[in-house]
Amino acid sequence: MASERQIHVGPVPVGGGAPVAVQTMTKTETANLQATMAQIRTVAEAGADIVRVAVPREQDAEALKTIVAESPIPIIADIHFNHTLALKAIEAGAHCVRLNPGNIGGPEKVAEVIALAKLHGTPLRVGVNSGSLPKHLRQLEYDNPVEALVTAALETVELMERLDFTNFKVSMKSTSVPNTIASNRMLAKRIPYPLHLGVTEAGTKWSGSLKSAVGLGTLLADGIGDTIRISLSTFHAEEEVKVAWEILKALKLRERGPDLIACPTCGRLQFDMDTVVSEVERRLEAYEDPIEVSVLGCAVNGIGEARHADFGITGAKDMGMIYSKGEPLKKVPTEQLVDELFKEIDRYYAAGKTVQRDELAAAEARAWLAENEDDTQLTPERIAAMEAAAAEDAETVLESMLSGAGPPIEDRPAPAAALDEEVSPVAGRRFSRN
């Protein structure tokens, strides 16, 4: 359920059906202009739509003037405790201000910030997280943490509306993935404003990425969420951006850059696939187009499991094959697979996104694939061929019966009994394979 309302953080639309925006936060001291601007440019190049900077001191607020002027993407000023810093951030031109009304000093100070935000047309991000709930909700937090989060968020929304301010988005984060999911589901049904998603203090690159993928992925799959930030314990903010994009790409919500498909490997593997996949992933970083590339470890998987890929490779001990959209292109020695794959990709782009096919090389690749396939595997292609053959046999028998030819009726096999859909254990789940 996409939010009804839309705001703009600089030129970036948030909510109201706009694409889910990717955010991150700089890890530098904001007043260190050289370091901060370097990181902002890095995250922008990695795909961040918006970046947040911490403003805990006067010198950080002062630095915002330069940062806003030079940043390639919109800047959000992150303010806690001191509402005067929020005022200075707005005056410095911040494209948005993050404010937690629960720790900024009371409704009067919030009202002062909102009055200036109205004057400058500056949107706010308001909200709560599990580590900073108001004191009057502390007991509810112990009894029902989800209800406490939602109550705090609703109180914040009600305050904004009492102050006649609607140019805001809401964030409600928890360190708990289930609580993050449950509370945002509940809140999404009760307010029309854009929602910013995140699992706060998620953890390391490994554990934090998994928590974020589960929590945010679940909500985004439900249609909840208008902007996201992955919170990882890393000094490299671009890593947060990369994880965010992988989540959005996995859900087909946005496209950016290549999509790599790779099988998990097993005992059939006969070449150094780990190295191959790593090298393919590294070299794909140079391409901006959302091309789909597959790396499969053996001819059992062959092409079938990734026949939709724009390009792919499947390998064996000494030889491998390059294919496109399920059709073989050529066989090459295993040690040349990566280089030859990228030659084909570059030829494709040079020809205006047209696959270049040498029929002789393709025929050799088909022959190699046939020799290396496991003919006991029921691949989709084999199943389709078997069903086509069975259908053809049935048609031949029917024609024979209608013409009076064929064995006597008493020698013909009895037809299979039709299943009663009402009593069948698979009622309603029948399907036909095309």
Image: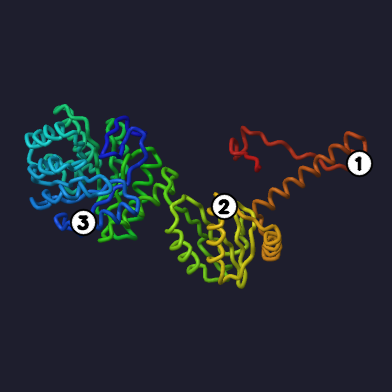
Disc 2 marks which residue? 351
Mark 2 vs mark 3: in front: 2
Question: Which image quarter is the C terminus in?
Answer: top right
Numbered label attached to residue 406: 1
Numbered label attached to residue 90: none
| Residue nearest the observer in this picture, 22 or 32 | 32
Decide: few, some or many residues near mark 1? Use Cα within 10 Å; few <14, some 14-19, many ≥20: some
Q: Amino acid at mark 2?
A: Ala
Question: Which image quarter is the N terminus in?
Answer: top left
Residues tagged 2 and 1 counted as in contact (Cβ below 8 A): no
Decide: few, some or many residues near mark 2? Use Cα within 10 Å; few <14, some 14-19, many ≥20: few
User: In x, y percent, where is residue 429?
Assistant: 59, 38
Q: Give the left or right position of residue 103, taking residue 412 as reference.
A: left
User: In x, y percent, where is residue 342?
Assistant: 53, 61
Q: Residue at x 52, y 56 (%)?
A: 293
Dot 1 or dot 3: first in sequence order is 3
Q: Give the left or right position of residue 272, taking residue 213 as reference.
A: right
Disc 3 marks which residue? 36
